[in-house]
Image (cartoon, helix red, strand yellow):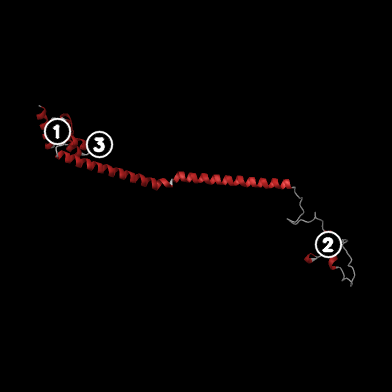
Amino acid sequence: MGFGMQKWIYNQRPRKLFGKRENKGGFDSIDSLFSSKDLNIEGRTIQKKESREELLKLVREKALKSKVLNTIIVVCLIVIMALLLYIFKPWSLQNSSNYIGQEERKFVEEKIEAFNISMEYGKYNLSKKAYSLAINDFNNALSLFPENSEALIFLTKSYLNDCLTNNNNCENAILKVEELLIRFPENAEFLSYKISIEEKIN
């Protein structure tokens, strides 16, 4: 029969006033129609009650699993971040290059400033015929920039004047004149320095 009705239900006659209805199915109540074993309603079946110790054990196992899982996730994230930082090095791409560039520029500027000061003092001492002081100043300038021709020329002049005037540093004067002639072999002024020293020595 449609609508889920059983035959014995729709075959019943209306009951009499204040009378009991006869149970055709042979059951005392509707509850006795089905046993708890026959019911298959998910989440509503009667389950065996677990002891407190078993429940605590289950809770501890779940907590331990969640802790292990969280630890693994955190370790993986740390490793990934460390690898990314090692590969890209964001702090060294800009900060270190800028810092190194600034330090190099500062060092070069200080070096040029010290060279200019040494040259100025050397020229002043040379004009005042303080040859030993001038020699020290020009040597300091050459120690900063060994290939600088101006410092070499003024150092040679200081040695030459000290040799010709005070008869000091004649050997150093010869060496510096030869060094100048290696750099400028056809310079007439430097050739005259060599002639002057040779005449002084001879």
State the residue in front, 59 or 30.
59
Return the residue at label 1.
162
For the residues bearing labels 3 and 2, Cβ distance under 8 angstroms:
no
Q: Secondary structure at mark 3?
A: helix
Which residue was labeled with disc 3? Answer: 143
User: Tag 3: residue type?
Assistant: Ser
Instruction: Judge the density around disc 3: few (<14), some (14-19), many (≥20) Cα neighbours within 10 Å.
Output: few
Amino acid residing under circle 1: Asp
Give the foreground label among 3 and 1: 1
- Gap in Å between the C-alphas at discs 3 and 2? 115 Å
Q: Position of residue 117 (x, y in %)?
A: 22, 42
Element type at mark 1: helix
Please tell me which residue is depicted at 27% across the width and 42% down the height of the picture.
Answer: 111
Sequence-first tag of 2 and 1: 2
SS at mark 2 in the image: helix
Name the residue located 48 percent from the left edge and 44 percent from the top edge. 83
Q: Earlier in the sequence, mark 3 or mark 2?
A: 2
Any part of residue 194 in sight: no
Q: Is residue 139 above or below residue 103?
A: above
Q: Are marks 2 and 1 in contact (CB under 8 Å)?
A: no
- The image quarter in which residue 188 lies: top left
Q: Residues within 10 Å of mark 1 (few under 14, many from 20)?
A: many
Residue farthest top in this picture: 202
Marker disc for residue 30:
2
| Quadrant (top left, top right, bottom left, bottom right) of the C terminus | top left
